[in-house]
Image (tube, helix red, strand yellow):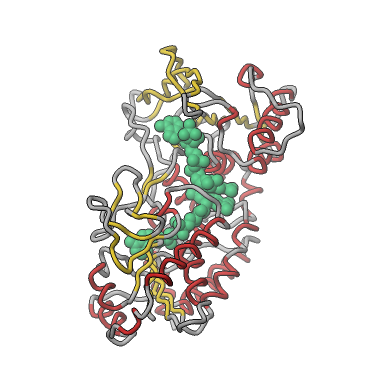
């Protein structure tokens, strides 16, 4: 049995592990990634000051060490290889391509300079090659981060960390340099609904209170009407409310930087200054409405205010990128699927032997660990659907390599990645950091050429 997995993030690796553990048949897994480096958002998304989370890659290394596993990095589905070609070379295909597009606010002036989706900012500070040259102008004192999820928290935290806090992390060198010279002193995190509806996780919310040079400010009126149930509960909502109340009860502090948490406001327009760059954000106050089905939504009241900020970072979610030949669900912005089986979005008929895992299947929800069970569940479908499928004769396993090399693609193997890894770790030691990432593909390939 030969399977292609496209994408080497958590969902792809957990699917590989579940496939390679099969005892009924020998499975050969070829895992492709468009980058020369594996691990998806564990490398390019997880915040540099959360190093312990990245230790999960040791589990993926064990999967990669299995004898029937191969990594083919620096190969992009849609430009270097087509879906049709994969169908010829593999019995089954698993798409694990994540959510690499951002969602838009859809308000006037969203495209102007210094209104930057969090995807770009995060990719930039994490050394993702796509964002190595992003223009991140930190010369402004006040920044708005839109959204009440953990990505908004990461974004604000990195903006407000001191250089000393960042130096010992694997933040990209170009970002460290820019953040050292940053003039940002105040960050506003803006939620369109109330504190009870925020999707922050409590440890992340609590971390603001532990930062070296930041006071967290919550105006008591932001929490008016929020009730913590008497029974000391343990839900995320209750824990968040308690943390927010502790921030609201704090006397004004004397630290150099401020983080403000604001609720029940929606951006309606970005204001451009005379230089064409962000100069402010119009916010409409919302009231919270409970719908008949129990969902809680925000409705604009018509009352507006202007928040004077020089930069806006929307952190309002992600969407899957469309790939040529891969069925796309326009509404959900994921690969069209039914419980992980790829389907034709029009007829809803199952497309045989093609599967999807991770954020490309569900949209941007869930922590790294959640993909273990979810990918194994989809592999369960692959086993159930694929009885006898390995009888179909395929070209030699290495034929795909020849096809790619014939096109001038430099395939990066897992051993190659380990060499890059060693180089990055050695560079990092010089600044006392876990690694100093190489942030562009050209340099990675040059390093590998020096055999
Ligand atoms: C900023 C941020 C911080 C996060 N921090 C945490 C955290 O601290 N803890 C936690 O538990 N969770 C965290 N998460 C969530 C976690 O990262 C995701 O749940 C998880 O990475 C999703 O896994 P995935 O495999 O579906 O996608 P991804 O991790 O995005 O992997 C997708 C892979 O597919 C590759 N790819 C895409 N298109 C192609 C193509 N056409 N051809 C070939 N390869 C392709 C990409 O290069 C990438 O390697 C964070 C998420 C974000 C956005
Ligand atoms: N440290 C960590 O563990 C960590 C770090 C980063 C990410 N992650 C995980 O990665 C996943 C994605 O995180 P995320 O923060 O992108 O997603 P999220 O938790 O879904 O948060 C998205 C936020 O954007 C808001 N939003 C959406 N559209 C909006 C609009 N038009 N205007 C204003 N606000 C809007 C949402 O508000 P509504 O609720 O009102 O829709 C929500 O507050 C989550 O599972 C998260 O836990 C984890």
Q: Residue 363: image x %, image y %? A: 42, 48
- The residue shown at (42%, 77%) is 29
- The residue shown at (64%, 17%) is 224
Query: Which quarter of the rendered picture does the C terminus lie within?
Result: bottom left
Numbered circles on residues, count: 0
- Kindly indicate the quadrant of the structure image that contains residue 84: bottom left
- Kindly indicate the quadrant of the structure image that contains residue 386: bottom left
The relative height of residue 228 versus residue 17 in the rendered view (above or below) is above
* Nearer the observer, 69 or 385: 385
Q: Residue 383: image x %, image y %? A: 43, 72
The relative height of residue 340 versus residue 93 in the rendered view (above or below) is above
* Nearer the observer, 351 or 35: 351
Left or right: 171 in relation to 314: right
Left or right: 335 in relation to 264: left
- The residue shown at (55%, 42%) is 150
Whether residue 47 is visible = no
Whether residue 372 is visible = yes
Q: Residue 177: image x %, image y %? A: 53, 49
Q: Residue 416: image x %, image y %? A: 46, 77
* Nearer the observer, 299 or 146: 299
Query: Which quarter of the rendered picture does the N terminus lie within?
Result: bottom left
- The residue shown at (34%, 79%) is 389
The relative height of residue 99 versus residue 11 in the rendered view (above or below) is above
- Of all residues shown, which one is farthest toward the bottom? 396
The relative height of residue 172 versus residue 5 in the rendered view (above or below) is above
Left or right: 403 in relation to 20: left
């Amino acid at each position: 049995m030969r399977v292609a997995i496209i994408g080497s993030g958590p969902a792809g690796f957990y699917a590989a592990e579940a496939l390679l553990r099969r005892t009924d048949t020998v499975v050969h897994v070829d895992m492709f990634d468009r980058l020369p480096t594996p691990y998806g958002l564990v490398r390019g998304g997880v915040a540099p000051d959360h190093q312990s989370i990245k230790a999960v890659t040791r589990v993926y290394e064990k999967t990669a060490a299995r004898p029937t596993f191969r990594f083919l990095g620096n190969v992009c589905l849609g430009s270097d290889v087509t879906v049709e070609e994969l169908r010829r070379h593999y019995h089954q295909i698993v798409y694990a391509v994540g959510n690499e597009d951002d969602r838009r606010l859809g308000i006037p002036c969203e495209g102007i300079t210094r209104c930057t989706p969090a995807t770009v900012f995060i990719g930039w500070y994490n050394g993702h090659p796509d964002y190595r040259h992003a223009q991140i102008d930190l010369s402004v004192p006040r920044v708005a981060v839109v959204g009440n999820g953990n990505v908004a928290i990461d974004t604000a935290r990195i903006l407000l960390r001191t250089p000393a806090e960042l130096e010992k992390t694997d933040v990209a060198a170009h970002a460290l340099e820019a953040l050292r010279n940053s003039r940002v002193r105040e960050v506003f995190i803006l939620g369109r609904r109330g504190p009870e509806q925020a999707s922050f996780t409590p440890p992340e919310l609590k971390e603001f209170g532990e930062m070296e040079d930041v006071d967290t400010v919550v105006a008591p009126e932001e929490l008016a009407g929020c009730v913590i149930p008497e029974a000391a509960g343990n839900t995320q909502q209750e824990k968040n409310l308690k943390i927010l109340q502790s921030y609201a009860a704090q006397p004004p502090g004397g630290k150099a930087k401020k983080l403000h948490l604001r609720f029940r406001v929606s951006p309606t327009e970005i204001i451009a200054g005379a230089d064409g760059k962000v100069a402010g954000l119009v916010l409409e106050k919302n009231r919270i409405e409970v719908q008949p089905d129990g969902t809680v939504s925000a409705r604009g009241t018509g009352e507006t205010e202007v928040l004077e900020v020089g930069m806006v970072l929307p952190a309002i979610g992600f969407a899957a990128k469309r790939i040529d030949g891969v069925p796309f669900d326009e509404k959900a912005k994921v690969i069209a699927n039914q419980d992980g089986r790829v389907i034709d979005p029009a007829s809803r008929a199952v497309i045989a032997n093609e599967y999807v895992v991770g954020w490309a299947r569900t949209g941007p929800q869930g922590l790294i660990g959640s993909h273990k069970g979810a990918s194994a569940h989809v592999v369960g479908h692959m086993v159930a659907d694929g009885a006898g499928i390995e009888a179909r004769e395929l070209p030699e396993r290495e034929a795909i390599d020849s096809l790619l090399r014939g096109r001038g693609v430099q395939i990066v193997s897992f051993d190659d990645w380990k060499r890059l890894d060693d180089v990055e770790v050695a560079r990092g030691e010089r600044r006392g950091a876990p690694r100093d990432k190489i942030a562009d593909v050209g340099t990675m390939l040059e390093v590998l050429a020096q055999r």
